[in-house]
Amino acid sequence: MRAPSEHEIAAGNVLLAVEDVSLAFGGVKAVAGVSFDIRKGEIRAIIGPNGAGKTSLLNIINGFYQPQHGRITFKGRPRAAMRPYDAALGGIARTFQNVALFKGMTALDNIMAGRTLKMRRGLFWQLLRIGPALAEEIEQRRRVEEIIDFLKIQHIRKIQVGKLPYGLQKRVELGRALAMEPDLLLLDEPMAGMNLEEKEDMSRFILDVNAHYGTTIALIEHDMGVVMDLSDRVLVLDHGVKIADGTPAEVQADQAVIDAYLGLSH
Amino acid sequence: MFYREVGQFKTSYDADEAIFPIAQDRWSVIVLIAFASLGVPLFAGQYLYTEVLIPVLILSIAAIGLNILTGYCGQLSLGSGGFMAVGAYAAYNLALRLPETNIILVFLFAGVMAMLVGLLFGLPSLRIKGFYLAVATLASQFFLEWAFARVKWFTNYAPSGSVAVGRIELFGIPIDTPGKTYIFVLAITVVLTLAAKNLVRGRIGRMWMAIRDMDIAAEIIGIRPLHAKLSAFAVSSFYIGVAGALWAFLRLGSWEPLAFDVNRSFQVLFMIIIGGLGTLLGSFLGAAFIVLVPIFLNQLPSWLGIAMSTAMISHIEFMLFGAMIVLFLIAEPHGLARLWAIGKEKLRLWPFPY
């Protein structure tokens, strides 16, 4: 299917490595000793029943939570405790399970906001809005329009995102993340609450992003059909512990995974 | 029928990002500014200048300032009066101690001093939000009021605590008549409004709005809350400081700290709530509403031919004014600017139903 990146997803080409990471909230262990890696150019799915610690894991990668234990290596460098801002600077973008758009802004402004880090002109130039500031704004607008074309949301550019239907909001949120030109894109349930057609559209966009921009993607998803079709490798969590890791076919056949999803008769 | 963008195609992003992309809007604003600067002086009298036009313009600047902070960046502030006072006293002291300073520099200095004080009092916003921040800014209001009343240096040891400004001139031209004052204030308002519009539609404006709408998501796309909030405090305080200096110099002439008490803060806050949070147009509409409605209510009994004592009139004015604000907020919580936007939407189709 995705011809270009197969050879890149070699074992040596690790973008992000998570080693023995643990996170607890008081007595609740959200993530317990999880190790896995994300290779350059792959689509990595993270699945598991509710409360398995999937979102917590994304929040750790993203810098929202600091793990109490373990090591994270991103782009070959071990990473110290950091803020989400540093993650953004390092090239990690994400979307949220519940759409986290800027509701009072238009779709265009939302995606433009995703390019904040690419813009340099300060307050003085901004308030004059001539010369370099204007040129920069127009250049970024052009880049954003490419993303808008890519996601086919031209018709809703100037509409406040709060007024858009859910499926389109999800698409705008993906656009905002893409505007950052990330090296690693984290998608937290990109298809939650969508109907079949919207899911198919979103799957196509995810595959296209991966093929077209070469972006490495880690996604959490509950729709097994989607996960098995899209992903190169699947990580399965249950109760904060890794129970399986491998290709979709391997994971599907794994007894521990079947038990976790279907329940185990004691 | 006449107000439609049909046939107006934009061929560049530059044209699409213009302040008024629709030709009719563009021309209306040009005509409005031309009328305000050339037409108004032909018929306006002293009363219209000093009681209506000048106050509306100056308070619009203050409202733009607060709107940047509260409407665009979502940080509630009750300290506008205090920041206006900072601007007023900074301007007073500069004009007093260096009398040769150009009046434009005096007002710039007022804005910069208010900006510095605003940055200082904006620091808590990094830790506290919403009502708690409102209380913190209220504390700054009381602190500043106290400082200008008690620290005698600010008022140049005036025994009564009241200070007055002398002659104001710009490049040798004295600004002494209401007409000249009006033109001067109008020019400053136009420049500051344009600058504010540029800011809010650029990167910095998007940063502010992102922080307002969802600060967590803002941080993951690389917007530092510290940077966004403090820049909003700085720009907002600058505008409010300039408005304070203009108010003191060109509207009051002589004043005491009471002129910038907490009522002033509430007045500016009402303006942006009634006018519309997060719109520059709303700042003007709100300022006009707050200035004009009391005048209107005050005149109403005599127009209707009802004999009433002035005390009674002012009491009824208070009651009606309060009631109008409450009713208005129930009917249109998004303010006058939203009404205007809805009207424009309707106008595009008029006279056809759809």
Image (cartoon, grey):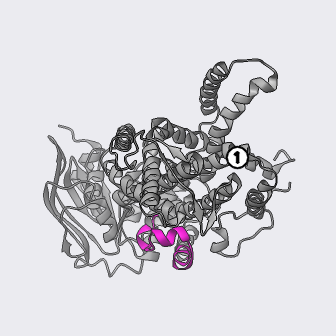
In the rendered image, which quarter contains the N terminus of chain A?
Answer: bottom left
Q: Is residue A130 magenta?
A: yes
Whether residue B270 is in magenta: the answer is no
Q: Which residues make up the magenta segment? A: A113-138
Vertical order, B90 against B160 (above or below) = below
Could you tell me which chain the residue with mark 1 belongs to? B
Taking depth in this image into account, of B297 and B334 the one nearest to the observer is B297
**What is the magenta segment's predominant secondary structure?**
helix
Q: Is residue A219 above or below residue B134?
A: below
Callout 1 amino acid: Trp
Instruction: Specify the farthest residue to the front.
Output: B159
Residue pointed to by mark 1: B340
Lateral position of residue B304 relative to residue A137, left or right: right
Residue closer to the observer: A88 or B121: B121
Looking at the picture, tell me which residue is in the foreground, B20 or A30: B20
Q: Position of residue A111 (x, y in %)?
A: 50, 63
In the rendered image, residue B286, in percent from the top left (x then y), is placed at: 62, 43
From what the image shows, is residue A186 above or below residue B71?
A: below
Q: Provide residue B26's location: percent of width, then percent of height.
A: 74, 63
Number of marks in picture: 1
Q: Residue at x 45, y 47 (%)?
A: B85
Question: Badge 1 local density, few (<14 within 10 Å), some, or many (20+)?
Answer: some
Please state if B143 lies on the left or on the right of A135 as rendered: left
* Residue depicted at x 42% and y 44%: B82
Picture coordinates of residue A177, whole percent (x, y): 43, 64
Q: Which element carries disc 1, helix, strand or loop? A: helix
Residue A154 visible here: yes
Corner quadrant of residue B18: bottom right
* Residue at the image position 57 percent from the left and 71 percent from the top: A145
- Image quadrant of residue A234? bottom left
Looking at the rendered image, the quarter that the C terminus of chain A falls into is: top left
